Structures are given as structure tokens and as C-alpha cells.
Image (tube, rainbow, N blue to C red):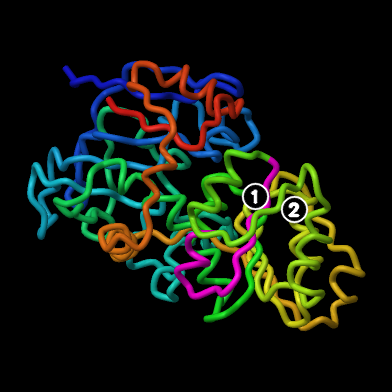
């Protein structure tokens, strides 16, 4: 009889429930991780609400920290009992997308057509990590050992939001001395703010409506914060830059209004780096886009994955150059994950990220 585990399972739109599931069998290239800490992502809330479709019965979650419980017969270089993380994106390492240098899109291009987010498998196309155990595919491409000096909550942001936020700064091409505006200071935006500072920006401006998030933006490296509930963010950013605009605007929410505002504050030749997940068509205003003649760039990012990306991010944390631990504002046991979803989905009590421990 199969051994069972607790897992947060998508039942139908509006319902993610904790239930029993068999512990997965381990294939030759896989590893079974015993999850010690995980969290809830804004994308999981999109799944809960039915705004992003996944199969019924799927275990949700894509941000795992844990210990290797069992290794596949062909996996080398790791040991059972070793502390590890795996990225939200789990590339195979051998697909066309991986070999072209875009591991996040692993598996996206097929003879049946192209689908974005092919590399995002946990809680999307395979069972995820809001459970007691997680099966990690292509373990040798995806498992990253956690340094002994770092605790679970210190590395909890690495699998997704740190990787995503930093990629917004990286793909925006931030140079030393650049002026950067980051629209929305949720978890992704806060990591983008930290990434902009680490990339050498001379002036970082954080935009949000919530005082707690604006205070956290300062802690993550924002030089100025703009309360968009009280001020016209575009006008205030243009005032702060003496009419020049910003070199890079990072959009971290996924709405028409923030996308448009990010476009409107760009200097000629500036870059809009988009991280938001959009649930409706975008409109590009001809004036903000300078009729297509402004030498602007619009770039999009899905968080990079794979063990080398995770190693690099943990190296930044271990060096002390960034501390994202303060973003964990609430803690729950896995048994209480339905209550954690209710809190996180409604953004109550100043929640930023929750730590879930089986």
C-alpha cells in the first residue's frame, strides 16, 4: 500500500484544500525532497481564483526548501539528507529552449505550437511543493545545496520572487548610475527594488499605495517612495527626475494602469521591464509610446531557474548584500494552509510572504 502525505490540492476555482495523496515514486533522474519550508505565491492565488487554469487534483506550490529524502538511481553528486532548494522553474537542461539560453521556456516550443512558461512545472503541469514531499525532475539540473550558514527562511525567496525580481533588473539592462522606477512593491517588486540597487542604480524610486510596503521598499534599497494613492505617480517621478524620465521602469503588478505609467515615465531610449502576470489584453497609448519612434524597449521575464541560478542567489544572500528575511511576515503549519490562503489572497494584516512548514 502506498505511503501517504498531506498536500494542498486544487479542487475547483475557489477551493484549494489540504488532503492526502500518495508519496511519489522516484524515477532514475528524479529526487524526492522532504519539504521543510515553502510559501504561497501570487500566482497560486490566480490559480485559486480560476484566473490561471491547472488540472483539478494538482498539488499547488513552486517555492520549495527541504532535505533530500531519496535519490534516483542515475543521480550523482548529491546525498540523501542534504539540505537543498529547487527553483520554481525546473529546466531539463537539454531542450531547445535550454540550449538557446532560455531555460525558463524549457518545453514551451513543440511541434504542436508554442506555449509560454514551459519551464514552470511545479504546481502548473506537475505536482508542486505545498506538501510534505515533492518529486523534483531532472534533479542534477535543479537541486542546489543550501549553505550551512543559511536558514530556510533566508533562502525561501530564491526559488521564485528573488529570481523574478532580480531578472526584472537584469533584463532591464540597468547600468551604474541609472535612474529606476519600480511600480508596485509587493514581493516581486520589492525584490526588483533590491535588484536595481545591487545592479548599480544611482536612484531607485518605489511606487505603491500601502504604507507598510513603501516602508519595506526603503529597507530594500529605494531612495524615494511614491504613494500612488495620494499622488500622481507619473507626475511625481517626472518631478524627481527634473523632467528627464527614468532609464528603466520595472512593472511588477500586471495591470494596464501600472504598465501604462511605467511607459509614460521612460526617458527617450529607456526600457520598460515587465514582470507582471497580465490577465487581460494590454493597450499601448500612442502618446506614451511616442508613436513607436521613441527608441524604447519593452522586455518581459519569467524567473530563471536551475541550480546555478539558485547558487548565485544564495551567494548574494550569504554575502549579506541583500536580506529578504524580513519579507516573511506570517508563519503557518501545513495543516493551516487553507487559513494561510485566506489571509494571503485577501492581503490582510500587512502580509507580504508566509512561511509554511509541514
Measuring from the top left, give residue 219's x and y in whole percent: 49, 52
Q: Is residue 66 above or below residue 290?
A: above
Mark 1 / mark 2, whichever is N-terminal: 1
Which one is in front, 305 or 163? 163
Residue at image coords 50%, 24%: 341
354 vs 306, left or right, is: right
Which one is in front, 110 or 260? 260
Q: Label 2 belongs to which residue?
A: 258
Q: Label 1 belongs to which residue?
A: 184
Give residue 169's mark: none
Which one is in front, 229 or 140? 229
Q: Is residue 253 above or below residue 97?
A: above
Residue at image coords 56%, 32%: 45
In magenta stretch: residue 235 = no
Query: In this picture, which residue range is highlighted in magenta?
Result: 193-209
Q: In the rendered picture of this protein, how many numbered marks are placed on residues?
A: 2
Measuring from the top left, give residue 271's x and y in whole percent: 68, 74
Amino acid at each position: 500500500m502506498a505511503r501517504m502525505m498531506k498536500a494542498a490540492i486544487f479542487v475547483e476555482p475557489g477551493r484549494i484544500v489540504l488532503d492526502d495523496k500518495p508519496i511519489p515514486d522516484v524515477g532514475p533522474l528524479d529526487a524526492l525532497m522532504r519539504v521543510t519550508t515553502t510559501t504561497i505565491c501570487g500566482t497560486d492565488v490566480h490559480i485559486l481564483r480560476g484566473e490561471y487554469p491547472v488540472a483539478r487534483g494538482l498539488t499547488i506550490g513552486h517555492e520549495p526548501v527541504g532535505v533530500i529524502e531519496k535519490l534516483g538511481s542515475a543521480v550523482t553528486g548529491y546525498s540523501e539528507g542534504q539540505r537543498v532548494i529547487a527553483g520554481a522553474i525546473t529546466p531539463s537542461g537539454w531542450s531547445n529552449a535550454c540550449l538557446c539560453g532560455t531555460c525558463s521556456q524549457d518545453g514551451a516550443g513543440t511541434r504542436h505550437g508554442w506555449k509560454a512558461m514551459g519551464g514552470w512545472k511545479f504546481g502548473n503541469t506537475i505536482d508542486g511543493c505545498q506538501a510534505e514531499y515533492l518529486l523534483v525532475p531532472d534533479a542534477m539540473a535543479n537541486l542546489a545545496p543550501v549553505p550551512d550558514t543559511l536558514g530556510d527562511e533566508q533562502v525561501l525567496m530564491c526559488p521564485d520572487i528573488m529570481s523574478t525580481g532580480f531578472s526584472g533588473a537584469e533584463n532591464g539592462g540597468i547600468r551604474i548610475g541609472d535612474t529606476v522606477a519600480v511600480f508596485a512593491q509587493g514581493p516581486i517588486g520589492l525584490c526588483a527594488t533590491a535588484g536595481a540597487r545591487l545592479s548599480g542604480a544611482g536612484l531607485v524610486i518605489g511606487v505603491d499605495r500601502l504604507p507598510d510596503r513603501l516602508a519595506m521598499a526603503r529597507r530594500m534599497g529605494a531612495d524615494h517612495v511614491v504613494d500612488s494613492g495620494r499622488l500622481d505617480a507619473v507626475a511625481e517621478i517626472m518631478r524627481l527626475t527634473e523632467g528627464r524620465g527614468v532609464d528603466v521602469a520595472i512593472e511588477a503588478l500586471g495591470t494596464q494602469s501600472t504598465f501604462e505609467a511605467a511607459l509614460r515615465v521612460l526617458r527617450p531610449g529607456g526600457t520598460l521591464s515587465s514582470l507582471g502576470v497580465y490577465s487581460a489584453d494590454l493597450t499601448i497609448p500612442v502618446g506614451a509610446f511616442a508613436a513607436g519612434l521613441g527608441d524604447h524597449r519593452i522586455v518581459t521575464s519569467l524567473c530563471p531557474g536551475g541550480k546555478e541560478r539558485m547558487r548565485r542567489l544564495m551567494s548574494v544572500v550569504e554575502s549579506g548584500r541583500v536580506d529578504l528575511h524580513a519579507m516573511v511576515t506570517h508563519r503557518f503549519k501545513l495543516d493551516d494552509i487553507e487559513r494561510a490562503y485566506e489571509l494571503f489572497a485577501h492581503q490582510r494584516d500587512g502580509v507580504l510572504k508566509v512561511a509554511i512548514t509541514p
